[in-house]
Image (cartoon, rainbow, N blue to C red):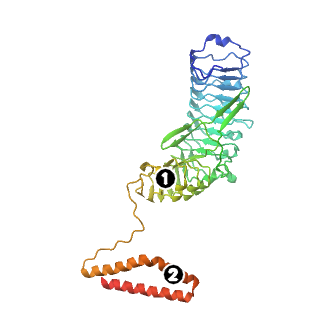
């Protein structure tokens, strides 16, 4: 175990002849080692090999077929993956991300190892389509092919991976419809499809099925259109508020215990935020930068555990649902660059955890609600809405309670008439509340006939005042 030191230079040649039959675990990860390694390693009974986070280059070495865990991520390996790697039929974890590997992903990767739990190939230069032959014997729990050049449709055989929890397809060229057929995956919690060419409507699934455990959905930067209806995808139970402080991991148990944390990237204020771990309690919906239209789905407010909601850069219209105030765990809310109208709901002041808020570049009107968190946001959160007023915008709201302005009079006679009118106006403001209370009391506790008689008298009095006003002009 030589991992996590500051070893420089190349691996000495004598090491390749050391303990060829007895060595079962080699860890030289997280050093500054460089150079090109042998294509085939000599340790025939090896179970665990980790070369991660060094500066090795050249073709990816192939360990013994007995290997259970192979980690070679974060190096400079190049070239195609050899199909010989599929001889490792007992492999539990294969982590090859952050290299310069190219070519097509071997088709055997779909079924070469039934025990395989972790398959991470992200941030390379793979092209072509995904393997098509995932079997129902699969134990795959995390599959990550993000940041490659993959294309085509998703293999429907992924529906056989009933243990799958995390599927990361982001930053490729996949061209397909929304995978509603994945509702049959009972453990799927994370589905990330951002920056691809997915398109079409997200319709109502057959038999009204929902993803039973899905808590993180990122379909941003695609070509989806039509309405986004949350209940077509999410279960209220799955998106409930939970207090778990544990992380979403893939655990591998053999001669040692290994736990692989799931990673995730979300977009906040046009910037990417990378999470090296995902809390089980995280609940995220990001549909930004698509062509969704129509009203914002009010049922989203029933997803109590929602942590981040990004609907920015779409064609959404109508009002912001007041039900959003029910998502009390919400920390990120971005509705910017749409066609939303009406006032910002006062219920959003109830969101006491809100750390990022953006409703800029819409058609919103009226005063900006005040609240412990809403008071902390800058003008950038509200700009591009000419009808909005109040802090932090420079536009001052006109009070709806201000007394009406009367036109100025031109003659002395009109001046006296104006004074007469103001006397009645002020009297009305001062006594209106008392009269209302008295009338209500009469209506409830006295005779109905007496109440109607008083109302009639008031109506006649108002008619007389109106006639005097006309005469004075």
x%, y% of residue 264?
58, 38
Q: Is residue 436 above or below residue 337?
A: below
In this view, the residue in front, 286 or 366, is 366
Residue picked out by circle 2: 438
Q: Quadrant of the C terminus?
A: bottom left
Label 1, label 2: how far apart the Cα atoms are = 41 Å
Q: Is residue 255 above or below residue 324?
A: above
**What residue occupies the far left of the structure in this picture?**
411
Residue picked out by circle 1: 374
In this view, the residue in front, 239 or 337, is 239
**Residues at discs 1 and 2 in contact (Cβ within 8 Å):** no
For residue 169, say whether it is visible. Answer: yes
Q: Is residue 374 found left or right of 161 in the rendered image?
A: left
Q: Nearer the viewer, mark 1 or mark 2?
A: 2
Tell me the SS state at disc 1: helix
Mark 1 or 2, nearer chain start:
1
Q: Quadrant of residue 25?
A: top right
**What residue occupies the far right of the structure in this picture?**
137
* Residue at figure coordinates x 71%, y 14% from the top left: 20
* Residue at figure coordinates x 47%, y 59% from the top left: 343
Tell me the SS state at disc 2: helix
x%, y% of residue 16?
66, 13
x%, y% of residue 85?
67, 24
* Residue at figure coordinates x 68%, y 48% from the top left: 212
**What residue occupies the far top of the structure in this picture?**
14
Q: Quadrant of residue 155?
A: top right
In this view, the residue in front, 36 or 407, is 407
Q: Quadrant of the N terminus?
A: top right
């Amino acid at each position: 175990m030589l991992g996590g030191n500051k070893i420089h230079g190349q691996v000495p040649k004598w090491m390749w002849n050391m303990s060829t039959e007895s060595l079962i675990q080699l860890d030289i990860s997280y050093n500054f080692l460089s150079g090109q390694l042998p294509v085939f390693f000599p340790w025939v009974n090896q179970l665990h090999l980790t070369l991660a986070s060094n500066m090795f280059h050249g073709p990816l070495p192939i360990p013994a077929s007995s290997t259970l865990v192979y980690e070679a991520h974060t190096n400079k390996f190049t070239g195609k993956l050899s199909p010989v790697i599929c001889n490792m039929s007992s492999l539990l974890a294969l982590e090859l991300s952050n290299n310069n590997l190219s070519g097509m992903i071997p088709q055997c990767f779909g079924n070469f190892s039934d025990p395989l739990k972790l398959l991470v190939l992200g941030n390379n230069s793979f092209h072509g389509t995904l393997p098509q032959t995932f079997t129902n014997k699969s134990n795959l729990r995390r599959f990550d092919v993000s940041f490659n050049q993959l294309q085509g449709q998703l293999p429907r055989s992924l529906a056989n991976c009933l243990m799958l929890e995390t599927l990361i397809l982001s930053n490729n060229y996949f061209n397909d419809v929304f995978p509603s057929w994945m509702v049959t995956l009972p453990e799927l919690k994370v589905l990330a499809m951002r920056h691809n060419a997915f398109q079409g409507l997200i319709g109502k699934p057959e038999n009204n099925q929902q993803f039973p455990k899905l808590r993180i959905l990122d379909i941003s930067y695609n070509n989806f259109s039509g309405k986004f209806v949350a209940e077509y995808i999410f279960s209220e139970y799955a998106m409930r508020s939970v207090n778990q402080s544990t992380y979403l991991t893939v655990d591998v148990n053999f001669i040692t215990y290994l736990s692989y944390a799931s990673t995730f990237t979300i977009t906040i204020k046009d910037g990417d935020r990378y999470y090296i771990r995902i809390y089980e309690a995280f609940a995220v919906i990001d549909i930004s930068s698509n062509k969704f239209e129509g009203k914002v789905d009010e049922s989203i407010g029933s997803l109590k555990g929602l942590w981040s909601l990004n609907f920015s850069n779409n064609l959404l219209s109508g009002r912001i649902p007041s039900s959003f105030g029910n998502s009390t765990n919400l920390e990120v809310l971005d509705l910017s660059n749409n066609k939303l109208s009406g006032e910002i709901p006062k219920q959003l002041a109830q969101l006491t955890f809100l750390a990022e808020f953006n409703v800029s570049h819409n058609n919103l009107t009226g005063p900006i609600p005040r609240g412990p968190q809403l008071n902390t946001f800058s003008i950038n959160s509200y700009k591009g809405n000419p009808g909005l007023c109040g802090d932090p915008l420079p536009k001052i709201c006109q009070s709806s309670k201000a007394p009406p302005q009367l036109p100025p009079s031109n003659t002395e006679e009109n001046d006296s008439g104006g004074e007469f009118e103001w006397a009645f106006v002020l009297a009305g403001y001062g006594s209106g509340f008392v009269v209302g209370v008295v009338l209500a009391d009469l209506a409830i506790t006295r005779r109905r006939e007496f109440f109607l008689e008083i109302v009639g008298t008031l109506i006649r009095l108002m008619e007389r005042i109106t006639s005097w006003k006309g005469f004075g002009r």
